Image (tube, grey):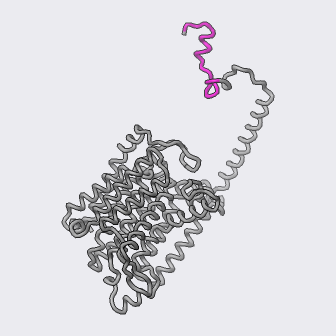
Amino acid sequence: MREYLLTLCITAAVTYLLTGPVRKFAIVAGAMPEIRARDVHREPTPRLGGIAMFFGLCAGLLVADHLTNLNEVFTKSNEPRALLSGAALIWLIGVLDDKFEIDALIKLGGQMIAAGVMVMQGLTILWLPIPKVGTVALTQWQGTLLTVALVVITINAVNFVDGLDGLASGMVCIAAAAFFMYAYRIWYSYGIESAAPATLFAAVLMGMCLGFLPHNMHPARIFMGDSGSMLIGLVLAAGAISITGQVDPDSLFGGSERQAVHQMVPVYIPLLLPLTIIAIPAADLVLAIVRRTWRGQSPFAADRGHLHHRLLEIGHSHSRAVLIMYFWSALIAFGALAYSVNSASMWIVLGIVILSAIGLVLLLLPRFTPRAPRWAEAFVPPRYRRRRAASAALAQTAVEASEEEECDAEERTPVVAGVAGVNGATALSARSRFLDRRKAGTSR
């Protein structure tokens, strides 16, 4: 555990320290696209944050390779090298997209090639645990197609959810934390060495997100861009593939216990835990594809219909919308993790239900904004105070009245060519007083 924590800290430190210089480089390189209709930020913000995250990934794998216990992951498995190869390719495609806005189909092809590179080096799904059936071995083509599909779906799910400051990095960090606990339990409790690469991938992924998150919280100073979102999506998918296709479920459970597990709710199955971890991004991805196809648009056409956009439309602030998405991601990921450890406990199910109810109340809170009594106004935020609401309404009424008076005055006053504030440069600012002095014949 100490070596995993050291790897996490080194990855986070390198990512954090490099993000500042990368931001300056992005500004100089012109990787600051204009604000689009679907964007929620108001000022052009540099991208290319994925550069710092990629070098953090490299630093974490390099440190792990020189540690006593984690070095066995590199000697006994080729999966870390496969991950690094696929990550380098997808990162390069993301950097080009952040700078030059490449076509969506080209990015999709690059994602499939990156997944194929990992498959060629051994990072693939070899078998599937099926409920009531057992372990089903896959052919080479079946494993390749399933691996590529999982990589592409995860990458695009993370990419689609990257719409608010700190949203994608925080949600993936929560998912990586839950996945790390699951993989570490399999590796340490059951002594299965083939789960060690997935545990390492989760630790490095947490470090990448934690190191970048301070720069990306609202208001963000830099965006990760596609170079970052596709990168962390690929690392998350690589961990899911490793724990699913390389760890034999029969080694976890034996005899009658294995028979009972296969007949129970399949949350025990390693394949479904990664899917629950990306449940929120995957749901957003599916809804986006259905919505755009129903409108006759391309599935890759951007819009403002994502889950985080809908939270803003309901009335949530930017920070509250991000925290709500964090809450639901943590509830699904850690709820599945707790249930996989002890599914017989009704307290876990009851806790998940109660937290879900709390999440629904927080989700619909702007629709039912309560007003605190006057004696409690000093102890609640201003938006729940009656006096603040009344004063705000009066101020809004006064502003609207003054605007109407100004409009009436402008209609009554004839506009003359050359008046300051109307023509030429004077339409942007008041005419300079120095111009008037020169017209008056002054020497200054």
Q: Is residue 36 above or below residue 294?
A: above
Question: Residue 102, image x and y in percent?
Answer: 47, 48
**191 to 426, vertically: above or below:** below
Please name the residue shown 39% across and 85% down the image. 134
| Image position, residue 108 (x, y; %) | 46, 57
Please state which of residues 93 and 414 is positioned toward the viewer in this rendering: 93
Q: Quadrant of residue 7?
A: bottom left
- Residue shown at 48% from the left, 47% from the top: 101
For this orientation, the residue located farthest to the right is: 412
420 vs 44, left or right, is right
Q: How many marks?
A: 0
Does residue 256 belong to the magenta stretch?
Answer: no
Coordinates of residue 73 in the picture (x, y in percent) = 24, 68
- Residue 436 falls inside the magenta stretch: yes
Magenta span: 424-443
Residue at point 24%, 58% (across, down)? 63
Q: Nearer the viewer, residue 327 or 288?
A: 288
Picture quarter with the C terminus: top right
Q: Position of residue 428 (x, y in %)?
A: 61, 28
In the rendered view, tell whether residue 227 sits above or below residue 250. Answer: above
Can you say which quadrant of the picture contains the N terminus?
bottom left
Closest to the observer, 324 or 369: 324
